[in-house]
Image: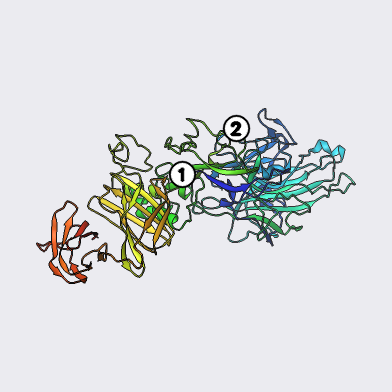
Amino acid sequence: MKRQVLVATALVLCSIAFGAMDGVAQQIFNQFRQPTLEVGRPYNDIDVCTISRLNKQVLGPAQFTLPPTNVNDLDDGYSYIAFPPNFRFNFNGIAHQGIYVSVNGFAVFPASTGATKLVPAKQSAGLFTNSASFPDNVLAPFWGDHRYRVAADIAQGFMPSEISYVFDVDRDANCDTIRPARPCLVIQWKNLNINDQSVNSSVGNFQVRLYLASASENFQGNIEFAYGQVGGNPNTSNSTVVTRGATVGIKGDGGFPNGPSDFWNGLRWAPQTGANSRTDSTSIWQPSGGRSDAVIRFTAIVRFTFDMWGMGDADTSKGFGQRHNGMEQNRYVTVNDARTIMRSIVTMRPLDSVWRRQAYQGDVNHTGRFYFTKLNRAFSGDSIVNGSLVIWRRTIDVDQFTGKLVRRDLYEGDGLYGVGGRAPDVSNLSQIYYEVTEYDAAFIMRYLSARLPYLPWVRDDITTGPNFGKAGEINAANNVDFGKPVAIGNGMYRIPVYVNGLVNDVFGVRLVSDAAIEGVTPVNGETASVTVDNSSNVVVITGNGSFDRTMPVAYVTVSADEAVNFTQVRFNEVEQRDVRVQVVTKDAVETVSAFPNPTTGASAIAITMPNAGTVSVRVFDTYGNLVSTLFDGNANAGTLSLNWNGMTEAGSFVAPGAYAIRVDGDVKATQMITVVR
């Protein structure tokens, strides 16, 4: 099945300066682009515009509490905002219907599975750290150690704070609607006592803006951070404002325990680098480049997401507004889904492996789940290689020690190291990735041929499985064989590919060649359907039906000199040994050749006669029955050139399949030829 893959990425666990994750275990950058600084976007206090002020909802001090006791907490508390029915916001694969607001300058989306981590989190490094001590799914315009001040604090020279929100539209400095109108949720921290609670003049104002996206945009809208003024507390003569040390950005729920989290740093705007690795904190006000007419924007990447694992829609054609939206499975699963998978393999551009995306849909046999970990196989500690901490890919449905498939589960929450169990470093389903292979494409083709009742197909016992009672076939194929190469001119050779046993359902094969691949020809029969795809060095072959070792499933045409090396050979998701196929050298001479081969009709036959002699040239089927006699008599030295029109001696066209051209007499040789229609 899927082999574990060591990822050459080390974590430098020094303070919070973790090394760049390069996409490993990061999903947030699949949801939003690197932040940008957008100038010409003024900060509008909610109270400035009349309509916004009238619709404003204040999150009063009593509403901020801290689980699990839910006692009132104006230092680290959270308050929940429920979205109205017409407002949904997709974050990290989930269309949320509400958000928690923290006193400490950030907001938290509820967890997709398990309890939301509403914990005291005043350390701003929490944006970059994946730990039980810090929340996940965070929007942080100004994460720091803040406090919600109330009227009773005026006696100590503090200014009362207000945290509020409004569902509105985007407005300009004159409070006019910016066209086209963009509905948004604005969360505002106003006159908040920021970063140092002992400094009564340290007051700041900032906002998070969530922009509503339509269903056609998967409810995934843009996020903006906006910043007003600081200071201005009339209750003290002090003027110090502490703006250093807060963090700005968005955080998912990926990463590694007690390691780096899944984040975009909002202080690293494109085209700067390091937004998914640098741990910079604030040094100036405003964090948006020192200006209040600019916002930090996280632009949503619109992608379709689905709730059904392995339903076969690898091209996501049933997404909102797409050609198969709202249709049944027998409409939205098409040959293009199999083609999409095969093309991804031959071009080496994997389908989106993030939870609920393309590969999630395409993993129809449910063997492709994996996640990234820094723990060793026994979960007893970190994985150390040559003194460095190594991140590697751990499969879920495959035993790590034997490489054997251990189970296939209908529901994605099952099977994680035991029924109902989870690996120590997997806390959320969205931390799991998915992979599709040519074997999945083969199952899709079998479904389309009406041999499977539905997808996903996870049953594999002898009464209901994909082999329909033949799963225990003694001579079942488990690899491919390569037949004798045939020279076809210009340095090109056609190599037949066979399965090495019986197949009575589906198979999928991937080959990587060190010789240039000129083309791949499928061999179809009355009970066998083969689909192929290739790039210049990768071949994918999928089959559906009945096959045995006597008939090629495909012909691979390569440009080569002496040999072709096939590596990364994979048969039904099992990695196989490398194979070296010796081709005929440029100076060698074929005794008998046929061109074209495969053929749809006539073929030119050439027999090399070292000396004059008597020969017969006849065509037989695979059962040994005579089909046609092409020559029977004396031939001169040199090349005997013949033609076969693809017909029997009775004058009828032969059925598609494999045939033997047999030369007997003073020269003996056999050449297989395949007829396709």
**Which numbered disc flags the more N-terminal residue, 2 or 1?**
1
- Quadrant of res 629: bottom left
Q: Where does label 1 land, which residue?
A: 2
Q: Where does label 2 land, which residue?
A: 380
The answer to whether one can see residue 444 in this image is no
Q: Secondary structure at mark 1?
A: loop
- Quadrant of res 385: top right
Q: Position of residue 5 (x, y in %)?
A: 52, 46
| In the foreground, 395 or 90 | 395
Q: Secondary structure at mark 2?
A: loop
Q: Which residue is found at the position 28% from the left and 46% from the top? A: 450
Q: Position of residue 179 (x, y in %)?
A: 60, 61
Give the CA separation, mark 2 to mark 1: 23 Å
The answer to whether one can see residue 436 in this image is yes
Q: Which residue is found at the position 24% from the left and 50% from the top? A: 527
Using residue 525 as the reference point, say whether residue 96 is left or right of it. right
Q: Position of residue 345 (x, y in %)?
A: 44, 54
**Which residue extends farthest right?**
237
| In the foreground, 2 or 446 | 2
**Which residue extends farthest top?**
69
| Mark 1: amino acid | Lys
Q: Quadrant of the C terminus?
A: bottom left
**Which residue extends farthest left?**
650
| Mark 2: amino acid | Ser
Q: Which residue is found at the position 58% from the left and 54% from the top? A: 300
